[in-house]
Image (cartoon, grey):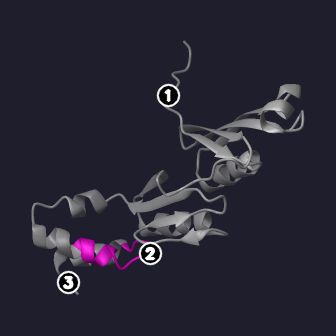
Amino acid sequence: MPAIKQKITPFLWFDTQAEQAAQFYTSVFKNSAVKQISRYGEAGRDVHGKEPGSVMIVEFELDGQTFTALNGGPHFKFTEAVSFQVSCDSQAEIDEFWRKLSAGGEEGQCGWLKDKYGLSWQIVPAVLPQLLGSDDATRRDRVMAALMTMKKFDIAALQRAYAGAA
């Protein structure tokens, strides 16, 4: 029986760092691996100015999610308009992903960061939708006020805000 392939795969455009980025991301997430590397042939020189034999496409998997990375040249850069959200069950998990993914990058507000390749990530507690989805507007407002003061999320502080404890 053939393996089921996901229908939608994120495709990331890099200048020349696709392989390095894939190696970095697979080192950050468990159950991850580089699956395949394709190289430019002679046509790559004409299309993207790439040397024959240089890395063209890297297919990799992060905890079961397939990604494709292309060394397409300097034409496009990442923006915050697209980010990857990582749902974390514990503060230790938030701390680990935050530390690893922000190394050499840039910390942002409300759980956002850019990694050293400029790709945006949201490191979010899994409980956040429940806290923000409360039927109690006062609780929602307290949680929102608390998270707006944070860079890296603090689950205990968000839960205290939800409960109305200082």
Residue 139 can be seen, yes or no: yes
Whether label 1 touches label 2, CB < 8 Å = no
Q: Is residue 145 left or right of residue 113?
A: left
- Give the CA distance from mark 1 to mark 2: 33 Å
Give the SS element for disc 3.
Answer: loop
Could you tell me which residue is drawn at 55 percent across and 66 percent down?
96
Q: Earlier in the sequence, mark 3 or mark 2?
A: 2
Q: Establish if 13 lies above or below 138.
A: above
Q: Pointer 2: residues within 10 angstroms few (<14), some, or many (20+)?
A: some
Any mark on residue 151, and which?
2
Question: What residue is disc 3 on?
Answer: 165
- Give the CA distance from mark 3 to mark 2: 21 Å
What is the quadrant of the N terminus in the image?
Answer: top right
Q: Pointer 1: residues within 10 angstroms few (<14), some, or many (20+)?
A: few
Image depth: mark 3 or mark 2 in front: 2
Q: Earlier in the sequence, mark 1 or mark 2?
A: 1
Question: What residue is disc 1 on?
Answer: 6
Q: Establish if 79 lies above or below 94.
A: above
Amino acid type shown at disc 3: Ala
Q: Residue furthest bottom?
A: 166
Q: Count of labels shown?
A: 3
Amino acid type shown at disc 2: Lys
Give the residues drawn in magenta, as a range.
143-154
Q: Is residue 134 left or right of residue 5?
A: left
User: Residue 143: horizontal and vertical position, in percent?
Assistant: 24, 72
Q: Earlier in the sequence, mark 1 or mark 3?
A: 1
Give the SS element for disc 1.
Answer: loop
Could you tell me which residue is drawn at 72 percent across and 35 percent down?
57
User: Residue 54: horizontal and vertical position, in percent?
Assistant: 86, 38
User: Residue 109: horizontal and vertical position, in percent?
Assistant: 43, 72
